[in-house]
Image (tube, rainbow, N blue to C red):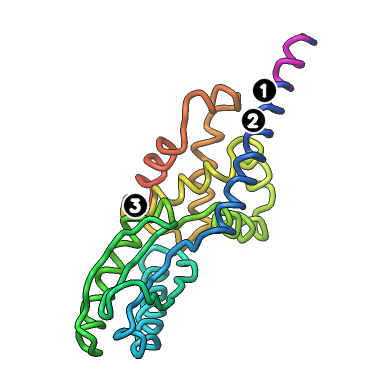
Amino acid sequence: MLKRIKNLFKINRKEERITVEQKIEDLFESLNEDTMLIEIGSDLVPFGVLICDIISELRNEVQSECGFILPAIRVRDNVFIQENELIISVRSKVKENLFMVPNEQSIREELYDILKSIVYDSIDSIFTNEIAEKYINTVQRNNSWLVWNMTNVISVIDIKTILSDIILKGKSIKNIDYVFEKIGEQIFSDNNYRDCLKKYNPHVIAKQVVKSL
């Protein structure tokens, strides 16, 4: 029995160490890059306020549709690209490179749809661990017991994966308390936590939760 407890302790320590290392790595990555970045050429600079308004409208729509709070999208000019060029990047990876007619109607009609498509296609990259922790803290205020037990079984990274998967499958996490309750039902359906971990992975949990949303 003592040997079994020691082995279990070693496993828990190893899982904790990996989680901490992953958090540190993600933290340094977040310091060095923007989650989303829009670079614009000189002809598009006068429309910077319009572009920011489009981003604001998009953030409101995404939050209304799926409950996801889109992080800040930075806009900056780039003197090394063509005058009417616009580049959209997610975590330093270019997702769209286009040339726009520098007038209000053209920018509004094109940019909104393109940005929305990129957001949903890249939700797993945009959904950071820090955002997941904010959702966890929100639920904790109302159901600390559930959060305490859940985070002793699965990591923040797992929770982030589950929530982003739910959005990718066309469901909303707006009612985050209810979503966490459904996640909890999947995790604690087996009293043996270690068996539960072997049986489930974040993608499987998300798939099961989606059925009840």
Residue assigned mark 1:
11
In the image: residue 194, left or right of residue 52: right
Residue closer to the observer: 179 or 45: 45
Real-space Cα separation, disc 2 to disc 1, in angstroms: 6 Å
Was residue 7 drawn as part of the magenta stretch in this picture?
yes
Q: Quadrant of residue 174?
A: bottom left
Q: Earlier in the sequence, mark 3 or mark 1?
A: 1
Residue 186 position within the rendered picture, expressed as x and y whole percent measured from the top left = 49, 37
Q: Looking at the image, is 23 positioned above or below residue 116?
A: above
Please give the name of the residue rendered at 55% of the width and 22% of the height, measured from the top-left corner.
Answer: 195
The region drawn magenta spans: 3-9
Near mark 1 (Cα within 10 A), the count class, few <14, some 14-19 or many ≥20, is few
Which SS type dominates the magenta stretch? helix
Q: Looking at the image, is 188 positioned above or below residue 30?
A: above
Q: Are marks 2 and 1 in contact (CB under 8 Å)?
A: yes
Q: Amino acid at mark 1?
A: Ile
Residue assigned mark 2:
15
Real-space Cα separation, disc 3 to disc 1, in angstroms: 32 Å
Real-space Cα separation, disc 3 to disc 2, in angstroms: 27 Å
Residue assigned mark 3:
168
Secondary structure beneath disc 1? helix
In the image: residue 175, left or right of residue 84: right
Please give the name of the residue rendered at 62% of the width and 45% of the height, measured from the top-left corner.
Answer: 23
Secondary structure beneath disc 3? helix
Near mark 3 (Cα within 10 A), the count class, few <14, some 14-19 or many ≥20, is some
